[in-house]
Image (cartoon, coloured by chain):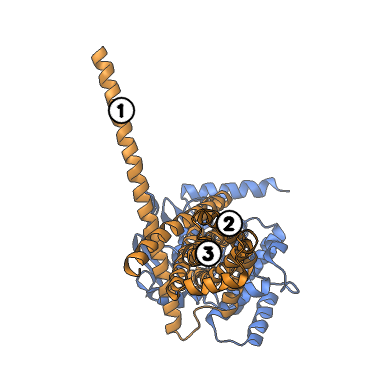
Chain colours: A orange, B blue
Amino acid sequence: MSDDASLNQEGAAEREEISSVGRVGALAISALQEIGCLVWMIKETGAEVRDRVMLGRSPIRLEQLFYQCDRVGVGSVPMVILLSLFIGLTMAMLTGYQLEIFGIVTLVPGVVSVSFTREMAPLFTGIVLASRVGAAYTAELGAMTAGGEVDAIEGMGIGALRYLVAPRFLAIFLMTPCLSMVSVISGICGAAFISSILLHLSYGYFYDQVVKYLLMKDVLAGGMKSLLFGGIIGVIACYKGLAVHGGAVGVGTATTSSVVTAICAVIACDSVSNILIVTFFP
Amino acid sequence: MVEMRAVELTFSDKAVLDGVNFSVRAEEVLVIMGMSGSGKSTLLSLLMGLLEPNKGSIFFKKENLTQLSRAELNAVRMQIGMVYQNAALLSSLTVQQNIALPLEELSDKSREEIDTLVDQKLEMVGLKDIRNKLPSELSGGMQKRVGLARALAMDPKLVLFDEPSAGLDPINSKLIDDLIIRLRTEQKVTSIVVTHEMDNAFAVATRMAFLDGGKIVFDGTPEEFRRSRLPIIISFLSSFSNHRKSTP
């Protein structure tokens, strides 16, 4: 009897281990399938744009593109400025307090401007856009998918991916570096403000140090990352919206998933790009 | 004009269509009937190229839709209009913008020509003065008629109707039926109507087909449909008759 019981226990433990392994495997397969569908969407969008160009017609309506750029860019400016101002302020304050111990508080402008330009601005801009714009894209496209509007656009021969995805993707791809630059300027202004009050660094000195330490390669690194993050957010948000199923609940689930996935992807790509930049462009 | 040959379609190991064969001649109104969930709307999605069959061929004007490239398929779609069950109007666009959308994206017409065509199509479906309204401000019947106006924007040769009278009151339902008949008699348009409403089916059909078990089990005239000895059709007709008997 005790042998049977121990055999049953072993069997149950083995089944649980297999099912845990199976769950991990299923998750991995699901993730790979999602990536595959995402790549397919990018490829088909490009193909529809190409087909349209070959017909001698504009692939994107300019009014649509400008409207999306206004939503993504102009609409995000207040939030980006506010966030960056306070992050720059906090960063300068905390960095300054630490560097004061070693008597090198004069390095604060250089440290803040370089780290903001290379890292903080693109990353926080990406996070703001993922939550503000990515969620909006997913919800819009999700509602259109659930309501049959995407099928209607496709059925008319217009090309749903070209009509819906291309202007949104292009808008966020172009606006992210612009917003990143706004973030850099706001962050440095916030840092300069708090440095003049608490660290007794004048604005003139702060400006001179920024110009001295901030190099073109820092600006380029930040700019390239911004472009990458904008593309990632646009692609994930549009894909999640078009892949919605399950009505209103599905739209809600997809919107949440879009924001979480985009933020994780941005942070992961940020780490990878930092390693590459530091390795190949020190 | 349209032909389906041995079309099979499976969703998650379930055969929705299992060897569908039918054809539609020019200027016909083919009404496809069947139980709810029998795959009628799926047939229309296949005709639009929104779904691909697992087997079989779909021909439109002798072109095999299953072998066309995306650009070629989009060119074919310009000749087909579809009226969806829920109208599927773009909710963020006004009525005018909805109807003008295919014209703006697919034709070289000027702004003035497009505006004129939009007014013509709205007049054709008996709607005026609603150009600037959003779909959410319209009744179900008005949305269906705007959907029809949009489907007719490119002057298609074939129009597909997915449950055109679903959710409509009898007056609006008759309006849609009259529009379908006028399309055939005045515009020489071929129509395929998917419905399970017997009244509407007999009102508009020049031919009828019945989809059951993933196959077309009947294909003939409305009179032949009434005289059919197939159990499923007898059951359909008897429900229709009982309904008619029970109404004063």
Q: Residue A161: where, in percent of width, then height?
A: 48, 69
Please identify, in this view, whether the residue under mark 1 or under mark 3 is nearer the observer. 3
* Distance of label 1 from label 3 (alpha carbons): 61 Å
- Say what amino acid the circle numbered 1 marks: Ala
State the residue at coordinates (56%, 48%). A249
- Say what amino acid the circle numbered 3 marks: Thr
Q: Secondary structure at mark 3?
A: helix
Please identify, in this view, whether the residue under mark 3 or under mark 2 is nearer the observer. 3
Do marks 1 and 3 share a subunit? yes
Q: Neighbour class for label 2 at 10 Å: few (<14), some, many (≥20)?
A: many
| B19 is higher (above) or lower (below) than B100 | above
Do marks 3 and 2 share a subunit? yes
| A219 is higher (above) or lower (below) than A106 | below
User: Circle 1 is placed at which residue position?
Assistant: A13
Q: Residue B19: where, in percent of width, then height?
A: 36, 57
Residue A106: mark in rendering: 3
Q: Secondary structure at mark 1?
A: helix
Give whichever of A159, A67 is nearer the camera. Answer: A67
Chain of the residue under the numbered disc 2 shown in the image: A
Dividing the picture into quarters, in which one does residue A65 lie? bottom right
Q: Earlier in the sequence, mark 2 or mark 1?
A: 1
Give whichever of B22, A84 is nearer the camera. Answer: A84
- Say what amino acid the circle numbered 2 marks: Met
Dividing the picture into quarters, in which one does residue A8 lie? top left
Q: Residue A275: where, in percent of width, then height?
A: 36, 61
Please identify, in this view, whether the residue under mark 2 or under mark 1 is nearer the observer. 2
| Quadrant, the C terminus of chain A | bottom left
